[in-house]
Amino acid sequence: MPPATDPNRVMIFDTTLRDGEQSPGCSMNLGEKLEMARALSDLGVDVIEAGFPIASPGDFESVQAIARTITGPIICGLARCNPADIDRAAEALKNAARPRIHVFLATSAIHREFKLKMSREEIVRRAVEGVERARGHVEDVEFSPEDAARTELDFLTEVVEKAVEAGATTLNIPDTVGYAVPSHYAEIIRYLKKNVRGSDRVVYSVHCHNDLGLAVSNSLAALMEGARQVECTINGIGERAGNCALEEIVMALRTRADHYKLQTGINTRLLYPTSRKLSMVTGMQVQRNKAIVGQNAFAHEAGIHQDGMLKERSTYEIMRPEDVGIPRTELVLGKHSGRHALKQRINDLGYRVDEGQFQRLFDAFKVLADRKKSIYDADIEALIENQLQTGAGDVWTLVNFTCSASSGVPPTAAVTLKHEDGRTVCEPAVGDGPVDAVLKSIQRGTGVELKVTDYRVRSVTGGLDAQGESVVEVEFEGRKISGRGADTNVIAASAMAFLQVINRVVMRRLHPRLKPTDNVEQEMVPVV
Ligand code: KIV
Ligand code: ZN
């Protein structure tokens, strides 16, 4: 039910593809964004902030593609308060069934003075013009006074009141720098709701950053004061320390429904698969002890806890793993399992694959089952993730590799790669270790030279025959780009991970992020 008719319904506004995607190591290509947008729609979010259309042709295209294909949730595009941004967002959203333009303008003294060099009057004027222009394109307009949590309350009241008068339908109050604490943030929402004329006509929204680790707490405090939209991201990704984590706020509202008496439209059983999907497409894993979706979130180690759990789960468990979609069974399939069993397990794990992907998965599963006696859920997830990440649009694919490493002799590798134009390359290389040799051979073959800033390998399950998952991170044009791969051979996993990085870099070179060229004195770099 929409919040307008149910006062206890909280709208979940997901900004994984906008604020989240801006953060280091989280960039996604068009196919990956579409894949995530589908997952978010299945999850039941109310709004998908699909991107910042003026930021680059790539951002524009992904907002456009999401607007064309995803029909359930509202699709939102971000714009600064200037005509070029707003018109570009409207153009990208043209085919959306339910479009929203989100305009923002900084209001705090610090931003007015140092970043925008604008007076209070100028800010109000531009905010009003921005909202009016957006309303000229769509009915659903959200206004955000950036850095609201550090804005003087009297001025904040004035700006948002004028934005409401100009036609804003949602008022978002960002804590852009993660400065607020729960009582302070709650007070801002309470004050605005009471003093802004027209408050009853708009939905109050919250957008909290996690610099002090308080994004979820601040958002909850604001909901207690009547905010009814939360802006959040899967796994809490986002600028710096990230945004409010979607899975955490949703499960807090659900688990403590006795206290908050609020509901969301989220299918919580898809929280874990959606979290995994994001980790897979970005290569950014969540920490082991991350609430709700971390590997340890439901693990009980202490003997006294285990004993209590065996007697009665609720002694130490406030949520059930299956409520968030963490698979119950551990040991699942083996060499003799058939297509049906694998298909069922993939569905149970919350993944959606098409027939072609399933066939490739089944082939990969059979190969793995020959190498490994027991196939666990984590193994299947790793296979799915390998499949989903090697997508359409990859310029380079791995054909095969050889690599030798023995004591006293420098390791060598020769990786054969195929370009999308049909040619194959193979440039042998010597390295400090076998992985280094493989990465060097790939760089030589593709002609893409990169500095690796991080390299990690972890075991997907226990046992010596376990698959190894490798994550490689590089820095390219000031942004972190990462890739992942999994295989029982960790060198193959590393080659897959690095090749994913290379494909991302090649795509970025083909479709660079441009600086917007509007003539407004606002900041020119599209990073917010
Ligand atoms: O953090 C912020 O202020 C933002 C706005 C664009 C809402 O991301
Ligand atoms: Zn933000």
Image: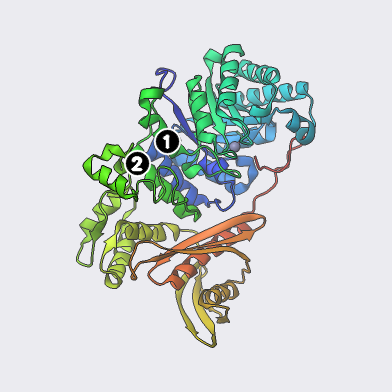
In the drawing, does residue 297 fall left or right of residue 169? left
Residue 209, percent from left and from top:
58, 37
Image disc number at residue 324: 2
Question: Which numbered mark, 1 or 2, is in the foreground of this view?
Answer: 2
Nearer to me, 74 or 238: 238
Residue 515, percent from left and from top:
70, 46
Residue 418, percent from left and from top:
49, 72
Q: Residue furthest front?
A: 304
Residue type at the position of mark 2: Val
Q: Does the residue labelled 1 lie within 8 Å of ligand 1?
A: no
Residue at point 56% right, 64% down? 502
In the drawing, does residue 517 fall left or right of residue 393? right
Work out how far the residue at label 1 is from the one at label 2, CA to CA, in angstroms.
Answer: 24 Å
Residue type at the position of mark 1: Thr
Residue 351 seen from this side:
no
Residue 39, percent from left and from top:
40, 44
Image disc number at residue 395: none
SS for dot 2: helix
Residue 369 sits in quarter: bottom left
**Total label count?**
2
Q: In which quarter of the image is the C terminus?
A: top right
In the drawing, does residue 468 fall left or right of residue 60? left
* Quadrant location, ligand no. 2: top right
Above-or-below relation of 510 to 123: below
Tags 1 and 2 in contact by the CB under 8 Å rule? no
Q: Name the residue under label 1.
A: 71
Q: In which quarter of the image is the N terminus?
A: top left
